[in-house]
Amino acid sequence: MERDPGPEGARRALGRLLEAVLASRGEANAVFDILAVLQSEDHEETQEAVRACSRLFGALLERGELFVGRLPSEDSVMAGSQGATRKYKVWMRHRYRSCCNRLQELLAHPSFEVKELALSTLMKFVQLEGAYPLEKPKWDGYYLFPRQLFKAVVEGLLSPEDDCSLLLSRFQEYLEHDDIRYHTMRAATDVVGRVADRYPEVPLTFWNNTFTLLSAVSLPRQECSFSTFYVKHVELSSTWKVVHLKEHRKAFQLMWLGFLRHKLPLSLYKKVLVVMHDSILPHLAQPSLMIDFLTRAYDVGGAISLLALNGLFVLIHQHNLEYPDFYRKLYGLLDPSVFHVKYRARFFHLADLFLSSSHLPAYLVAAFAKRLSRLALTAPPEALLMVLPFICNLLRRHPACRVLVHRPLGPELDADPYDPEEEDPAKSRALESSLWELQALQRHYHPEVSQAASVINQALSVPEVSIAPLLDLTAFEVFERDLKKKGQESVPLEFIPAQGLLGRQDDLCAQHFTLS
């Protein structure tokens, strides 16, 4: 193909070739010249070639000039005695497949503009193949969707080598369509399985791309009729799985279970647990299948256990999960780091919910109150302003624990019987102890902390104090709040008023200077 140098020359040359191929089957070999430009190293020329292929094969699909059915090998058809029309359609279908393969490769192109254009072109072909199928229906009413082409698109998005987060954000627009969302879940499940089998150690990039795609899939929470289809159909059949929320939930469940059964990086476990309670569990066909994953995560310790609390809360309260050592493990999570972790607010919100039941034994609640009081001795002010009302709320809910702050007939204690090293709250002897730590905090340097700790000096009010506004309190907010406080208008700076310029009347300065 002779053409002028540069993108503009390529655009004009490709336009002439495109018109020739569409005007006459005798010019079909010009398709090779168009496909050759797809290999160009100039990204602007490549974009022009992608646009030309989009127009060319889009028109051929609409005109029915591509072979329909199981595609035979090119050599056998061209060497056979079939008619010229059949040979042309088979030959052109092979060129179309070559084009799609190259477009899939371009999803990993260094230029984002090329990648984005390749994605939109492939999705255009998906829509056109759905409207003008290249496979024959197996029976009347059979649901046709270009599964193989779409699976190639998903496979290109889940690259093991390249970070596709930007391209995946562009792909999210297509997930608003019910059929695309359903087939994305099916294709992602298949791709994850094949890639995990192919690599002895799957690259982190692949897992990150996969999580980005999976977390973008969202289902409606209530039963509804699916009708927003990317591939248009004259009429939707109730026999198609793609129109039922139940089937979408099954596909969603298989997708996430297939992803989570592999060994993932620790950073990804945290990301999954962050969205588990709100974006995954509500959409599963059988949420109880996540029990093993969440209980193992809860047993890991540290931040992982804190994050697993959300999912366990949903399973315990909504799906009757029994976890015998749950409170013992929750008690074990209380260490000095709990006041400094990123997920502190979430942890104390859930801990407040788990300790809200009036049926909990007094020794258990006393153990939590005592452990928090001990940790409060070294906690920062912003955490203390939240944890002190938290402890007082525990005493309000469970009157049997008020002996920790008021035991009029109790024995004198020479030492604290509480054992902070004991992992079992039942054996910690917290109920025999007292919350002397709160009395110590009444002498805290920060006045608000001192005031919050002094609440135990009076009878505790019946209504609880809401800790919700205090959960996300930061050191910066405490500091800013202190700066805005107005102090006393007149503050005495010294006891003896000044008599001279530097304090004494007979000072040398007083002999030469005077105050006026």
Image (cartoon, rainbow, N blue to C red):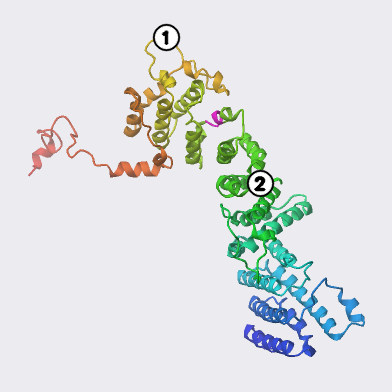
- Residue type at tag 2: Pro
* Mark 2 surroundings within 10 Å by alpha-carbon count, few (fewer than 14), some (14 through 19), many (20 or more): few
**403 within the magenta span:** no
Circle 1 Cα neighbour tier, 10 Å, few/some/many (<14 / 14–19 / ≥20): few
Residue 265 numbered tag? 2
Residue 10 lies in quadrant: bottom right
Nearer to the camera, 144 or 328: 144
Is there a contact, CB below 8 Å, between mark 2 and mark 1?
A: no
- Quarter of the image that includes the N terminus: bottom right
- Residue 184 placement, left or right of 282: right
- Mark 2 and mark 1 lie on one chain; the one further toward the N terminus is 2
Q: Nearer the viewer, residue 206 or 272?
A: 272
Which residues lie in the magenta part? 330-334
x 19%, y 36%: residue: 491
Q: What residue sits right under mark 1 in the picture?
A: 411
In the picture, which quadrant includes the C terminus? top left
Looking at the rendered structure, the secondary structure element under dot 2 is loop
Taking depth in this image into account, of 34 and 510 the one nearest to the observer is 34
Residue at 34 percent across and 45 percent down: it is 480
Horizontally, residue 83 falls left or right of residue 453, namely: right
User: Residue 235 location, x and y as percent?
Assistant: 65, 69
**Side of 382 where 209 appears, left or right:** right
- Secondary element type, mark 1: loop
Measured in 3D between alpha carbons, the distance from the residue under mark 2 to the one under mark 1, in whole angstroms, is 53 Å
Viewer-nearest residue: 176 or 343: 176
Q: Using the image, determine if residue 362 lies above or below residue 317.
A: above
Name the residue type under label 1.
Pro
Is residue 443 at least partly visible in the picture? Answer: no
